[in-house]
Each structure stands twice: as C-alpha cells, then as structure tokens.
Amino acid sequence: MGTVEWLVLFCASCLIIGSFSYIKPTPKQKREAKIRMRAIELGLKIKQLDMPNLSIEGRVNKTKAPLVFFQLHVPPKVGADKRTEIENTWIIQRTTGESGIYLADGWTWNQRSTNNDVVTFLEGFLNTQGEHIRAIDVNKYYVAISWNERPNNEYIETLKEDLEKLMKFSLS
C-alpha cells in the first residue's frame, strides 16, 4: 500500500474513533447522572429552569442561566379532593452583587416574600448552607434547591433533609 492509501485509512479510522469518543459521556456527565439517579431513588424530582444570571457579566448583559433544581413535591392530602398547596411562595438566588433586603450576604430575592416568618427562617437556614447552593424555590406545589453538584455524592441525602426542613416550614 502506498502513502495515499495509508493516509485515507488513517483518516477513516480517526473519523470512526472520533465519532465514538464524541458520544461517550465525560466523567462529569457520569458523576452528575449518578447523583441524579440517587436523587430519583430518594423520591426527588429534577427540573432545569432558566433563572436570571446574577454574575457580574449576567447582570450587565441581562442573560439567563440554566439551573438544575432538585424538587420535593407537597404530599397530597389524605382523603381530600383538593391538593395541598404552599401559601407563601418565594425564590432566592446567589448573587455577586448587592444582597437582598433581610437576606444573608450573597443572596437576593428573585420573587420576594413579605412574610416575616420566612425572613426569620431564612436567617438560620442560609447560614447552614454552603457556597454550593445556588438558588432556593418555594412554589405552591414543591420546594426546590439548586446546587452545583460538586460536593461528594453523599451530599444528596443532606439535600433531601434540607428540602424536608423547607417543606415542613412552608406547610406550617
């Protein structure tokens, strides 16, 4: 075989190997899939939402950032026709800018609560949360936390406990 044939064979091999390498999940994707599967096993739902990007560049350019939320849904009422709902809904996010009123440093309201009990609860709750938490969403039908999925895989159990604390507070 001549040089041209070897070159064609080499290019074809690279094309095939490259295609398979492209579809193979990266180590990060494998780690995230493992974390998300564990969350599903624990009864959490996972949803990606576009939230305002509160980094310096995001605030200047008014961009949105996709955040993955781990949700714990409100349990249904036993023997009732209507679903249980959380009355006081709110959303907070991490920010590199000015902190929101009544919130710990680095947090801002996306959807503000005027309930003083929420503010009191958040004072204690946010101080126990690490830098890996990005946003907290309390909706009519669920509570959710978005985190960067960087701590070890066992963190998902702690996340569920935090979601249960949020749920208990929100339904009280």
Image: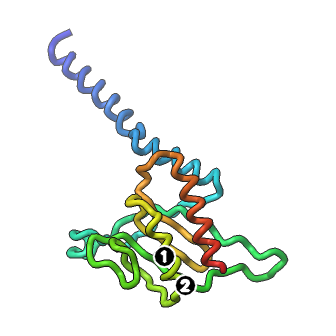
Chosen colour scheme: rainbow
What percent of the width, then of the height, locates residue 10?
Answer: 24, 21
Q: Residues within 10 Å of mark 1 (few under 14, many from 20)?
A: some
In this orientation, which residue lies closer to the viewer: 20 or 81? Answer: 81
At mark 1, the secondary structure is: helix
> Mark 2 or 1 closer to N-term?
2
User: In the image, what residue occupies the spot 44% across and 53% down?
Assistant: 149
What percent of the width, then of the height, locates residue 51?
Answer: 39, 72
Amino acid tagged 2? Asp
According to the image, label 2 marks what residue?
117
According to the image, label 1 marks what residue?
122
What percent of the width, then of the height, locates residue 33?
Answer: 50, 46
Could you tell whether 42 is left or right of 128 in the image? right
User: In the image, what residue occupies the spot 81% across and 80% down?
Assistant: 80
User: In the image, what residue occupies the spot 26% across and 75% down?
Assistant: 97
What percent of the width, then of the height, locates residue 79?
Answer: 84, 77
Query: From the viewer's perspective, is residue 110 above or below residue 154?
Result: below
Amino acid tagged 1? Leu
Q: CA distance from mark 2 to mark 1?
A: 9 Å
Q: Of the numbered discs in the image, which one, if any, rests on residue 95? A: none
At mark 2, the secondary structure is: helix
Could you tell whether 97 is left or right of 154 in the image? left
Could you tell whether 65 is left or right of 121 in the image? left
What quarter of the picture does the N terminus occupy?
A: top left
- Splitting the image into 4 quarters, where does residue 95 fall? bottom left
User: In the image, what residue occupies the spot 44% across and 49% down?
Assistant: 151
Residue extending furthest top?
1
